[in-house]
Image (cartoon, coloured by chain):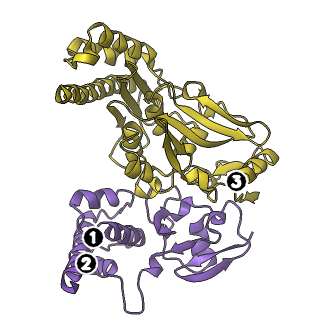
Amino acid sequence: MEFLRPATWDEALAAKAEFPTALPISGGTDVMVEMNFDVHRPSAILDLNRITELRQWEITDGVVRLGASVPYARIINELSEPLPGLALAAHTVGSPQIRNRGGVGGNLGGASPAGDAHPALLAAGRDVFVEVASAARGTRLIAIDDFYVGVKRNSMEKDELILRVHIPVADGPQQFSKIGTRNAMVIAVCAFGFALHPKNGTVGTGIGSAAPTPRRAVAAEEFLQGVLAERGLWESGDLLGAEVIQQFGELVKAAASPIDDVRGTADYRRHSLAVMARRTLTWTWNDYSKQIRSAA
Amino acid sequence: MRVTFTANGKPVEADDVWEGESLLYVLRERVGLPGSKNACEQGECGSCTVYLDDVPVCSCLVAAGQVQDREVRTVEGLADESGLDPVQQAFIDAGAVQCGFCTPGLLVQTHDLLEREPQPSDTDIREALSGNLCRCTGYEKIMDAVRLASARKCQKVGTSE
């Protein structure tokens, strides 16, 4: 096994081109578990810890450009205002020690349907992009809706690495909800992310751990967008009513295709998704209504 | 491969390190620092918690090659010539040690908590220690120990002013 320690991003891309089967490691919170238990023995390990760009974030033109290795602890401390949904999701990752090491790049690279960041990224809107690069072809942006292609599979090529994620700064309330057996050190039984985007009159959803890939509940989004527009609710901030909330929950539930496994049954996942969808919608809408009323 | 880094302020060198090896293994088996405990090897239990460049991490989840030229501080590095760290003394005084296997990780994690937040609430303590498991389930005494260490730390600050 090789241990590659590039000092710069260009060196990292060159190493990935030379060793396409090299396994990138940053926080190590997934990769080292596989090593320790001998689940996976890659031909080479590509350490990304020395690459400064991966640990930086910036906000330009209303978009957060979040380095793939910015640890969850820093997302919580530094980005809870521009990225409230992702910060809430980050707070449910593992433990303080895990949050000090792990970042969004690992969730995206691993593409496990249970990754906590995915529902928040999907809910943040269709303008979320994963910026990947290769030595041969340079940089490209993959829309988040095109990123997840199967269980633990993403749409990246073998010679590519994840540099950063582009996420629009929140323009409305966002929420994240996750089911597990306790409050810490929990892999999601299922999870749900939700965001209101008042500027363009859309809503965002993200379902985790209840389908082969993280996915959005498209019919639920369209239903809610329709109701909000028809009834002028974006302007008035008036109550949604029980029927709308109920219907939204049912549509989210219908969008999932979960399985029975050691963490929970498919039925339980569907049920809890409907509950989480109703709750996150109610929380965010109440926050939004308050904003409208206090602005009036 | 060879890995050189700083452990508790001293330069150390480990030879014949396997590329997939963890920092925990290097500490325990190659550089004579067995204080960090090997329990779960998957980041669930916190018994191997060490500082890596002043940030507490599970050493079982850090690849040995990743610590090249970096600074590691283990439980062995908490005490100095003048004696135990106040956090260690508080764990003894509060009786927060049963079998002792989780203690090194709890000490490092508590040390970090009190560095950042000298007067934590009970909620802060529970959250900070949520990644450290004690299978003797001595959590109440551990909570007492953290509160005691915090009280002593705050008292010290009060008297020196």
Q: Position of residue B1 (x, y in %)?
A: 75, 69
Q: Is residue A36 above or below residue A123?
A: below
Q: Is residue B149 above or below residue A249?
A: below
- The residue type indicated by label 1 comes to Pro
How packed mark 3 is, by other alpha carbons closer than 10 Å (few <14, some 14-19, many 20 or more), is: many
In the displayed structure image, the side of residue B153 where residue B116 appears, left or right: right
How packed mark 2 is, by other alpha carbons closer than 10 Å (few <14, some 14-19, many 20 or more), is: some
Name the residue that disc number 1 marks. Answer: B118
Please, which residue is most extreme toward the bottom here? B81
Q: Considering the image in quadrants, where does the C terminus of chain A appear? A: top left
- The residue type indicated by label 2 comes to Lys
What color was chain B assigned in the picture? purple
Cβ atoms under marks 1 and 2 closer than 8 Å: yes
**Could you confirm whether marks 1 and 2 are on the same chain?**
yes
Cβ atoms under marks 1 and 3 closer than 8 Å: no
- The yellow-tinted chain is A
Name the residue that disc number 3 marks. Answer: A46
Q: Quadrant of residue B98?
A: bottom left
- The residue type indicated by label 3 comes to Leu
Return the disc, 1 or 2, that comes first in the chain's sequence.
1
Name the residue that disc number 2 marks. Answer: B153
Distance between the alpha carbons at the discs numbered 1 and 3: 38 Å
